[in-house]
Amino acid sequence: MANINLKDRRIECKIVYYGPGRCGKTTNLQHIHNAFKKQVIGDMISIDTQGDRTLFFDFLPLGLGKIRGCDVKIQLYTVPGQVKYSSTRQLVLRGVDGVVFVADSLKVRREKNMLSLRDLHENLKKMGLWINKIPLVMQYNKRDLEAEGLPVMPVEQMEKELNRQLKVPSFNASAVNGQGVGETINACMKLTLRDLQRKFKWAQD
Amino acid sequence: MHSKPKLSSLFKEAELYRQQGLLNETLDQYRKIEKIIRKQAIGKNKETLLIKITADIEMVEKELNSFIESKEIPEVSEKVRELMRTMFSLDDPEVKGSSLMGEAIALAGFGQYEAAANAFERLLDFDHLRLDSAKKMLLYGLEFNGEKEVLLLLRKWETDARFTMEEINYLVKHLQYLLKTEKKRKNPDLPDIIEPESNVTENDLIDISDIRLRSPDVSGKESGVKLTVNFQHGIKLNIVVPQEQTEVAHALPAGKLIKGVVFSSNIGTFSGTIYVLLNRKIDFGPHIGDTSVNLKVIDISGR
Ligand SMILES: Nc1nc2c(ncn2[C@@H]2O[C@H](COP(=O)(O)OP(=O)(O)OP(=O)(O)O)[C@@H](O)[C@H]2O)c(=O)[nH]1
Ligand SMILES: [Mg+2]
């Protein structure tokens, strides 16, 4: 849950990157860490990985400076995508204000995307949150692999299978090259802050 | 007829999956290549290729096994534990001892059970937190160490002067409740929120008498399992999996997409894809103990 201090005009909120194993969540955070130096206000913490699979979470704190009279800080987290780390995903999700769902464009990962989205839905529900109410954006990652000759799903198919009911903003990305990473997080931050404004009326006119 | 895919591009695909850390997909791809080599290659080249592909398969299998064998949740260093505690504890400064409680819950959530149990144990000293801590110890103890260990814990508390008789009785009841919900949790009925759309229109579909699943994780055999269609409504099918075939029922969890399914009808056989809508154990009537599975036909083509 966002930490909002209206007296000191400070907001701290939490955005979580969710998605199946190996879809590129950690890569997104790494790119943000390297490319948005001005906003990064602390070390990126990646706790214990196995190979480069996340076992617990990654963490990156951002500071956006003053927005409409408020000092805004955002904490970015990733969950471990592997199915077996379900309880860790629930913990990392606790107090979430906005979600980026990273889907893997590779055809062979089609089913994994769907299962992970369902898992997000279930875990949010356990906390009394609804996937169609929470600020959420989709990212269709690894678009670059099409040029490598790998079977990649057309964006229209991914839209249909993952976003038909949710109808949230979606972005093509290639996180290894940084393409689409900024657009994705910007959209999610915007939705999240707007949602918090609706709930807490923090902004000054 | 589609043209034969080039081996080199198939190898490249496998290599790319591997770079992505998608080991299962790499293995599938290598197996596919192996089959093609066995079928198509000839002469000395065939031998060389087979040796290469066998080595590739072995290597990926080894890598996969090392992941499976590695301890599921490693114990982490004190420094990392500190991070988990501070970042995830539900700190409520109004209640004395409660920040320790939040830390302990966070540690348990990250699978650091030993450290969490130590913290809960210390909380048993506080009158207003004793029951809550004990309940958490039962909950996480059950998850990490199993029923036996938890029963021992209760036995120990019976002779622990900190607990009153009422508290013990309450905890015994609570454990019974936990055991019941644990069973339920292991067989959940998941709702189908992201059901894929079907490419088949309701009226296009012929009457299907049975389906055959070829996927090796269903039967392990190439021939597959035949399942009789119990009921068909448009593109939705219902089958009843007898209790003797539990492994088949388990291989059909709700939300699974299954390719390469063979449909039989009175005008011939077709192959296609199905999506599992629901998988539910039947608990009354003549089919009690069997599993009812609802399927949706996603696509279908001639053979
Ligand atoms: N080609 C390509 N590879 C990518 C892209 N994004 C990530 N990868 C690669 O995919 C692999 C997995 O990326 P990660 O960022 O570790 O994935 P993750 O989602 O954090 O995975 P878990 O921690 O296991 O849940 C790495 O080898 C990345 O280099 C992309 O856009 N294009
Ligand atoms: Mg990761």
Image (cartoon, grey):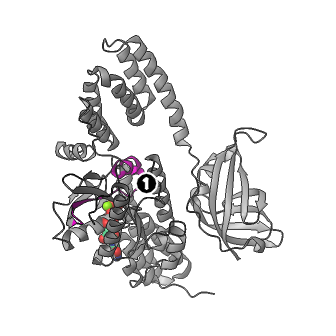
| Ligand 1 location (quadrant) | bottom left
State the residue at coordinates (29%, 64%): A26
Residue at the far right: name it: B266
Q: Nearer the viewer, residue A74 or B194?
A: A74
Q: Is residue B31 left or right of residue A67?
A: right
Residue at the far front: name it: A205
Q: Secondary structure at mark 1?
A: helix
Expressed as whole percent of the image width and height from the top left, the position of residue A125 reads 47, 50
Camera sees residue B41: yes
Camera sees residue A17: no
Q: Nearer the viewer, residue B37 or A161?
A: A161
Q: Indicate if the residue with disc 1 has its beta carbon within 8 Å of ligand 1.
A: no
When asked about the image quadrant of residue B85, the answer is top left
Expressed as whole percent of the image width and height from the top left, the position of residue A201 reads 32, 58
User: What residue did someone put label 1 on?
Assistant: A83
Number of marks in picture: 1
User: Can you say which quadrant of the picture contains the N terminus of chain B?
Assistant: bottom right
Q: Is residue B114 part of the magenta span, yes or no? A: no
Q: In the rendered structure, which amino acid carries the disc numbered 1?
A: Val
When asked about the image quadrant of residue B162, the answer is top left
State the residue at coordinates (41%, 51%): A84
When asked about the image quadrant of residue B58, the answer is bottom left
Q: Nearer the viewer, residue B219 or A118?
A: A118
